[in-house]
Image (cartoon, rainbow, N blue to C red):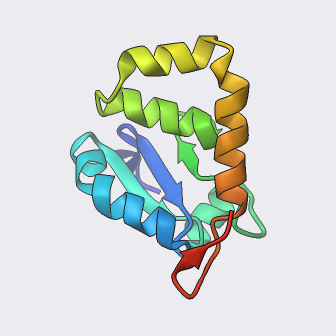
Amino acid sequence: MRNASLRRGIVCYDGACSICRKLISLFGVRLRKAGFRIAQLQDPEIQRRLGLMAVPDEMKLILPHGPVQGGIDAVITLSEALGMGRDLAATARSSLLRPALDQLYRLVAKHRRCSGGTCRL
């Protein structure tokens, strides 16, 4: 991967998930303008980079210089980068809400596979 693609990081999402694709269609332009690259977790280059054998149950955010965030951590980082709720993000990082946010993200992510256009939680 070229360093230019890592200006702010790479947002890695499940390209087989209609929820994920919808979120990328809503926020993709803003993410790109903010300096993020967007890639599917199914991309062989992303699979190699992350050492994956399958698509994980959470999105991944590859940050410059190697750190990788997943799940709610990635969502919080992206919301801060887009200027969406910096105060909320700070609260989510340091409060009693954090375990609930982690659990909610994992529940939705685990059950994101859609069949016939409907998703079962």
Q: Nearer the viewer, residue 32 or 106?
A: 106
Rendered residue at 69%/67% (across/down): 55
Tell me: residue 35, above or below residue 44. Answer: above
Give percent across and percent down for residue 99: 73, 27
- The residue that appears at 40% across and 58% down in the rendered structure is 23
Which of these two is toward me, 64 or 59? Answer: 59
Which of the image's four quarters has the C terminus?
bottom right
Q: In the current view of this chain or complex, which residue is farthest to the bottom? A: 116
Viewer-proximal residue, 64 or 81? Answer: 81
Residue 63 seen anywhere in this rendered image of the structure? no
Question: Which residue corresponds to the image point at 44% horizontal and 20% vertical from the top-left?
Answer: 88
Image mark count: 0
Residue 52, x across and y down, in percent: 74, 62
Whether residue 112 is visible = yes
Q: Residue furthest right?
A: 53
User: x, y percentage for residue 58?
Assistant: 65, 53
Classify 118 as above or below 4: below
Q: Name the side, left or right, on which 2 lies relative to 48.
A: left
Q: Residue at x 67, y 63 (%)?
A: 48
| Left or right: where 63 falls relative to 22 | right
